[in-house]
Amino acid sequence: MKWLDIPPVWLLAAIALAWAQARFVPYGLSFGGAFADFVGGVLVGGGLVLMALAVYEMRRHHTTFIPHRDANQMVTSGIFSRSRNPIYLGDILVLAGLILRMDAVLSLPLVPILLWVLEKRFVIPEENRLRIKFRANFARYCQKTRRWI
C-alpha cells in the first residue's frame, strides 16, 4: 500500500476527478475556449519543466527524489534556489492547467485540496527529516528560499 502514497497517485486521482466532473457534470460552465486552453497548456508545460529540472538537479547531486526516503544531500542549487518544493509545485501547475484545458470549472477546488494534501503528507515530513539531518544548513536554506514560490 505504501506505493499508493506517492504524489503522482494523488495527482492522477485529482485529474481523474476533474475529468469526470468535466465529462459528466459540466453544468454548462466554461473558462472560455482558446485563451483557457493556451493558459492551461502553459501551466502544464511549466509544471512538467519544473519537475524535470528538479529531478535533474537531484540526480546531479546523487540524492533521492522519491518521497518518504532520506536524502543523501541537501540540494539548494538550480531550481531549488527558487523553490524548496519544485516537484510538488509542478504537480499543482499540471493539475491547474489540465482543469483549464478540460473546462472543469467545478473542479477548481481540487487545486488547493491537492496543495494541502501534498503539504501535509509529503512536504512537512520531508522538511522535518531535512531539518533533523542538516540542521543549520536547512535553517539557512529556509530563510533564503520560500517553500513554494
Image (spheres, rainbow, N blue to C red):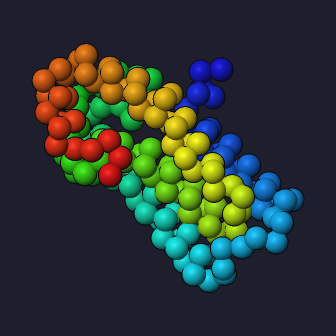
- List the single residue furthest toward the top: 132
- List the single residue furthest toward the bottom: 34
Give the residue at x 58% y 55%.
Answer: 95
Q: Quadrant of residue 38?
A: bottom right
Task: Report the number of numbered marks.
Answer: 0
Q: Quadrant of residue 58?
A: top left
- The vertical placement of 89 against 65, above or below, is below
Is residue 37 visible in the rendered image? The answer is yes
- The vertical placement of 36 against 55, above or below, is below
Could you say where residue 101 lies in the image, as x and y percent from the top left?
Answer: 64, 69
Question: Viewed as shown, does residue 124 lie left or right of 24?
Answer: left
Could you say where residue 7 lies in the image, as x and y percent from the top left?
Answer: 54, 37
Question: Viewed as shown, does residue 141 lie left or right of 13?
Answer: left
Give the residue at x 43% y 63%.
Answer: 46
Give the residue at x 57% y 42%.
Answer: 114
Question: Which quarter of the figure is the N terminus placed in?
Answer: top right
Could you say where residue 24 lies in the image, as x and y percent from the top left?
Answer: 86, 59
Could you say where residue 100 lies in the image, as x and y percent from the top left?
Answer: 62, 67
Give the residue at x 36% y 42%.
Answer: 85
Question: Viewed as shown, does residue 78 lie left or right of 127?
Answer: left
- The vertical placement of 107 against 36, above or below, is above
Is residue 55 visible in the rendered image? The answer is no
